[in-house]
Amino acid sequence: MTKVILYRLLQFPLILAVIYFLTFLLCWVAPGDPFSTERNMSETVRRSLQERFHAESPWKFLAYYPRQILFHGDLGPSMQQPEWSVNDIVGQSLPVSVTLGLFALVVGTVVGVGLGTLAAVRRGGVWDWLSLSLALIGISLPSFVVAAVVLMGAAASHRLPVGGWGRPVDVVLPGLALALAPMAYIARLTRVAMLDVLGADYVRTARAKGLGKSLVVWKHCLRNAFLPVLSYLGPAAAATLTGSFVVEKVFNIPGLGQHFVNSVLNRDQTLILGVVLVYSLFLLSLNLLVDVAYAWVDPRIEVDG
Amino acid sequence: MGKLLAIPAVMVVLLAGALVWSGGAAHPRADFAFINRGDIYTLDLNRMSFMQDFRLTYGIREGLFSPDPETLRPVPTGAASYDISPDKKVWTFRLRPEAKWSNGDPVTAADYVFSWRRMLEQPGEYTYLFYYVTNAERYEAAYAKRAPFDFGTVGMKAVDPLRLRVELDDPVPYLPDLLAFPPFYPRHERSMAPFLLTQADGKTIYDAAYTRPPHVVTNGPFVLTKWEYKVRLLLEKSPTYWDKANVRSDRLEMVVNENALSQFLQYDSGQVDWLADVKGDEAAELRAKGRTDLHSSPAFGTAFLTFLVQPTLPPGGGGGKNPLADARVRQALAMTIDKKFITDNITRMGELPARTYLPPDGTLPDFRWLPGPHQPAGGPTAPYAPEEVRALLPDAAGPAGPGLPYDVKRARALMADAGYPNGQGLPVLPILFNSENPTRAKIAQALKDQWRAALGVTIEVQQIEGKVYKERLSKKDYAIGLGAWYGDYPDASTFTDKYLSTSLQNDCDWRSKAYDDLCAAAKKEPDAAARVTLLSRAEHLIDTEVPIVPLYHYTNVSMSRSNVEGVLPNPRGTTIFKAVKVRR
């Protein structure tokens, strides 16, 4: 297992290098000038800015930035926000997005699994109906609608914060808005898996041996029913992280999601590359983590490279 | 089972850790909290160009002159007094001896020369404003090529610590207005030293991070004490400011919020006192609801159509012979736009339909507009004053007034004259605009309909991303575009310079010798009244030959409750924070 993890980790730099190069290629061929603002600028000004940012040619760019990243861990200055380096920007916004994403994921998993289990056990009952409705809403409503509805509710309550970031309470509403989609999906996954497991022979045996229903569900069934949820957590984490842009925008949260979109609109090449690298590293690590957790929960599963 | 429980447990622990990692401490509310037009793009004077950046800079820095909080006319602040030579080309400023930097150092003439020299050595968009100074342009070009050029010959000199001498090539009567504009503010060299970078070719530049607290040293009424990226900027009254007795608030906070709904909710819940700019649809909706805390002012800016007038169309304009090179076609298109329809139904913020390039908002009280070519016989022949133009604009269609009227019959005749009767033979022309501006999308559609109905002309609406739009316009790869211009300083040249043949901002590629000559004569003219007359004649050429078609004059819209003083909107969107006060 350790060998496999090491092998996977060794692949990271290669994958990241390919991602970096492809993203750079797309940045460079896309029309639009990173330095342009409201006025047209003189050749002298443009030249001076290009020199400052090592952006006179793709070669100069590639000769400078990758080396900086490798040897100094420096993602370079942002082309559009002159005061801030990409490290500054990522350093300030990544924690925000991670907190928000984790909150959504924890809430989504706990509530989703709980609802799914209840729905399967009380099949056809109120809980089943509730979980089905939640799934329908969560999967079909886009996050900008959910976020806006939640925000308007907060405004009407006159108590909850209407956007912004800084206090722990600020994570609750956007976190719930972001949690709805994975929650819905996880509830459905758990329900289906649980129904499968509930009909299995070993469950009937356990019940026949006189074990209580809740004990069987809790101890024997959930363990197996959780596996599909676990494998979904990797992509779900990815989706909540990358999909947080809309929620961040509506709630005015200074997360990484906005840079993911704005940097592209601004043609801020250094920021685009920095954010893409960070996201990629995150996704790679999450996938690895989920695979490891998978093997750990169910020893029958082998992680292979 | 323990293993299974471990997963949510680990997640919760991680979450708690993340909360600590990302959260800031709650902080007390500032005396005055506001949401700016957008987030700060930069506070580096060299690269600054957006209104929100200038707005904040007026709070933390000060030049030889500053806009008066009431009239916005320049009043000496960093300067105590000044002399002008008889030929009006040499200005000598005596600096205010009590003016201090936020670290206690005195503000000296060398600080101005240092800052202005930076504008030439590390040029930015407003470096061109320094070209009025003798040899400044040559020095900039030489420095860029690392060619030798003696800075001593450039017309900016510190005669002694409190005396600054500025030599100009031409008389510039509005120099105080320029000097009140942030690119002309001084900087504190010593505190910027850690940010000095030397490039491979030996040129020196400053990393813009010198503007961030705690390093930044400024000379204005407020000090920037905290800048949390994308969250907030905190300004505190400067203890070293020479006029601190007249600074009315102690702590200001600029809250960063770029989402219209959330902005409004923050304002409505009292978290902020002022929304500096309320845009488009939201503003129109609030206005319809009769909100009394919504304030508007005519703006020193105009929305217009820009035509590419060179003889052949580029690929992005459809290619082939360019019908827009013919002034008659442009005039016909201009005379069939129902501008009132646009301001009544699309923009809806009380904008005035425009007939002229320069806005009659009151910023230029001495400017006059010449009567248009279709002035009815017996009508007024004297040039129009700003208030006269304003009076006739709400119904902009009539024949009387400056510029061109709305006149479908005459427009059809012009099209026939130009060889396109009923629009026959005219290629399909694309109209280009940036997709992030929903108002422009509606205007383009309205124009398409209006022109088809009036002239039989077919237009293709093309909506593209902002950066690409900007590039296509500056590379002149378009046919018709939607554009806008706001004046930077209160002088007509901030508008007229844009359409000089040599101007970088001349997206039309309109080259009029008559226009260039009038502007050049105005530049040399020492008499203020004669100068304005020359510029009026130049402006008249734009209004009648229409390389651009003025559509409407903007309004500035903001929201503030009645207990907030000093933030009512004005034409130039300038806010003097020194005068801002919230009564609680």
Image: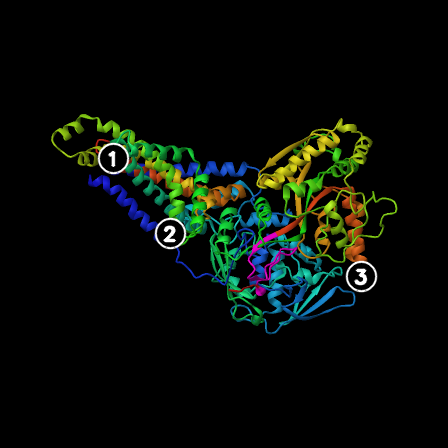
Which amino acid type is marked by label 3? Answer: Asp
Q: Residues within 10 Å of mark 3 (few under 14, many from 20)?
A: few
Q: Residue furthest right?
A: B378
**C-alpha gap between disc 2 and disc 3:** 64 Å
Mark drawn on residue B527: 3
Can you see residue B359? yes
Mark 2 and mark 3 in contact? Answer it, CB < 8 Å.
Answer: no
**C-alpha gap between disc 3 and disc 1:** 86 Å
**C-alpha gap between disc 1 and disc 2:** 36 Å
Across and down, in percent, residue B148 comes to 65, 57
Residue named by callout 2: A169
B450 horizontally vs A98: left or right: right
**On the rendered image, what quadrant is the C terminus of chain A found in?**
top left
Which amino acid type is marked by label 1? Answer: Ala
Bounds of the magenta segment: B557-579
Residue named by callout 1: A295
